[in-house]
Amino acid sequence: MPELPEVETVKRGIAPILEGNTLTKIITRRDKIRIAIPQDFISRCEGQEILQVVRKAKYLLLYLGSGDVIICHLGMSGRISLTSAKARKEPDIYEKHDHVIFETDKGDLVIYNDPRRFGIMTICHENDLETHRFFKDMGSEPLGNEFNGSSLYAKLKSKKTTLKTALLDQRVVVGMGNIYVCEALFDTGIAPERRACDLGQNKCEELVRNIREILERAIKAGGSTLKDYAQVDGELGYFQHSFKVYGREGEQCATKGCSAPIERITQSGRSTFYCPRCQN
């Protein structure tokens, strides 16, 4: 599933194409992806200028001149591709899993493709965004100022779940997925099975710094390519070549002086990779 860096990469890719331009034509080739596409989706989008493209957690938000906001989630296998007006050929031919197509007044196409159909395409008014069921219980944005050692400590101190599970809870911090939680715990030297409530404030400060650094490096590298993910221009992300633990079961730890093999355990149905010597 695309995580925060992948979604941020997509946002940065589509923003220059969409912001300041008008949606002249919308094609929905399915009535439902993970949830039903609203019946008035097309009528509320067509003819509207896109004021801003924003990432909120793992969601893409397209703010329209009318005050409505298009909400898009890429799900497990969703991706967005761009076709410039100059590159278009007549007639337009869409792939089997191209479910929603946006056309701008400049003739550019933004295409949402999702083979497994776990993504979301819906719309709401911006006044209802904060209370929307997708966002009302969200935790802190990990790249925002509100995410710091003190705020993380306050949220973890009463949680008796494992730290790995707590960090995947979107009510604690948004946008964090399995890959980047594994990498952040390794960089901070924390065992994934350690209880969240046992983490002191100083260690929370260190963990916050490492989460920010990892996410920023991943965004710069274009995200991580696992299975279906690719950037909007078709290029693949390369942060996966920098993984220190994720997917490296049996390989030697990358820490200088440590030759312990990376181990894998299952937590809440997900694989966790860690170094048993460096993380405690």
Image (tube, helix red, strand yellow):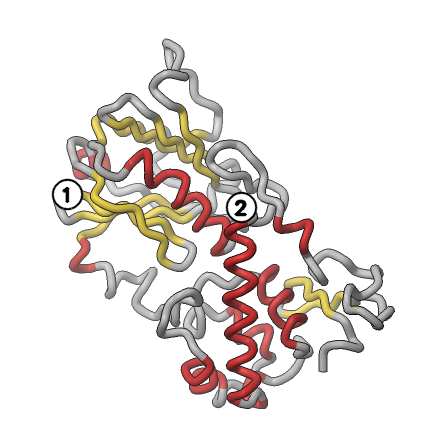
Residue 211 position within the rendered picture, expressed as x and y whole percent measured from the top left: 53, 68
Secondary structure found at label 1:
loop
Residues at discs 2 and 1 in contact (Cβ within 8 Å) = no
Mark pair 2, 1: CA separation: 30 Å
Secondary structure found at label 2:
loop
Q: Toward the viewer: 38 or 249?
A: 249
Instruction: Tell us which disc is closer to us: 2 or 1.
Output: 2
Q: Toward the viewer: 248 or 268?
A: 248
Q: Residue at x 58, y 90 (%)?
A: 198
| 93 w.r.t. 256: above or below | above
| 40 w.r.t. 180: above or below | above
Residue 54 position within the rendered picture, expressed as x and y whole percent measured from the top left: 32, 51
Residue 77 position within the rendered picture, expressed as x and y whole percent measured from the top left: 53, 43
In what quadrant of the picture does the C terminus appear? bottom right
Q: Which mark is residue 65?
A: 1
Q: Residues within 10 Å of mark 1 (few under 14, many from 20)?
A: some
Residue 139 position within the rendered picture, expressed as x and y whole percent measured from the top left: 39, 71
User: Callout 2, which amino acid?
Assistant: Gly
